[in-house]
Image (tube, helix red, strand yellow):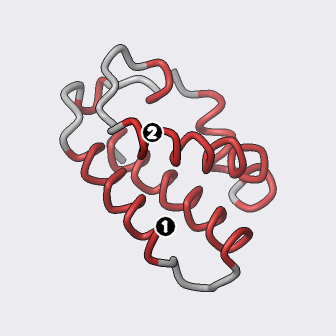
C-alpha cells in the first residue's frame, strides 16, 4: 500500500472517530465530511508523493489555516484513542518515519 493511500485511510479513521464521539452520529456530519474531503484532496496533491513524511513534520503547510486548526483538533482527540479503536493503524503510525 502506498504512503498516500495509507495516510488517507488513517485520516478517515481519525475523523470518523472524532465525529462519532463528538457529534454522535454513525455517519459523518457535514462539517466532518467537508474536513475529510479537504484532507483527502490535500493528500492527493501532496508535492512529496509517497516520499512524504508525517504532515506535522512537513516543511510545506498545504492546509488553509482554518482547516489546519480543525485537523489538529481532530488528531489531538483521535490520536490516543486510535490505540483502542484501530491498534494496527496506530502502531504503524508510531513506527513510521
Whichever of labels 2 and 1 marks the residue nearer the N terminus, that label is 1
The percent coordinates of residue 68 (x first, y second) are: 45, 39
Q: Residue at x 40, y 19 (%)?
A: 58
User: Contact (CB < 8 A) between labels 2 and 1?
Assistant: no
In the rendered structure, the answer to whether residue 47 lies left or right of residue 82 reads left
> Is disc 2 surrounded by few (<14), some (14 to 19) or many (20+) residues within 10 Å?
some
Query: For this rendering, which residue is in front, 72 or 45?
Result: 72
The percent coordinates of residue 55 (x first, y second) are: 44, 29
User: Residue 68, labelled with which disc?
Assistant: 2
Q: Residue at x 81, y 57 (%)?
A: 84
Disc 1 on helix, strand or loop? helix
Residue 4 placement: quadrant? top left
* Residue assigned mark 1: 32
Q: CA distance from mark 2 to mark 1?
A: 13 Å
Residue farthest to the front, as pictured: 66
Query: For this rendering, which residue is in front, 22 or 97?
Result: 22
Position of 54 relative to 59 (above/below):
below
Disc 2 on helix, strand or loop? helix
The percent coordinates of residue 22 (x first, y second) are: 71, 68
Residue 19 placement: quadrant? bottom right
> Is disc 1 surrounded by few (<14), some (14 to 19) or many (20+) residues within 10 Å?
many
Q: Residue at x 27, y 44 (%)?
A: 42
Amino acid at each position: 500500500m502506498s504512503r498516500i493511500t495509507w495516510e488517507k485511510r488513517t485520516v478517515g479513521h481519525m475523523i470518523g472517530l472524532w465525529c462519532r464521539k463528538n457529534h454522535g452520529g454513525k455517519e459523518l456530519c457535514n462539517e466532518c465530511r467537508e474536513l475529510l474531503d479537504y484532507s483527502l484532496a490535500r493528500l492527493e496533491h501532496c508535492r512529496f508523493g509517497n516520499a512524504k513524511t508525517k504532515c506535522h513534520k512537513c516543511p510545506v503547510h498545504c492546509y488553509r489555516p482554518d482547516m489546519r486548526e480543525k485537523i489538529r483538533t481532530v488528531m489531538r482527540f483521535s490520536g490516543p484513542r486510535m490505540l483502542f479503536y484501530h491498534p494496527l493503524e496506530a502502531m504503524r503510525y508510531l513506527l513510521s518515519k
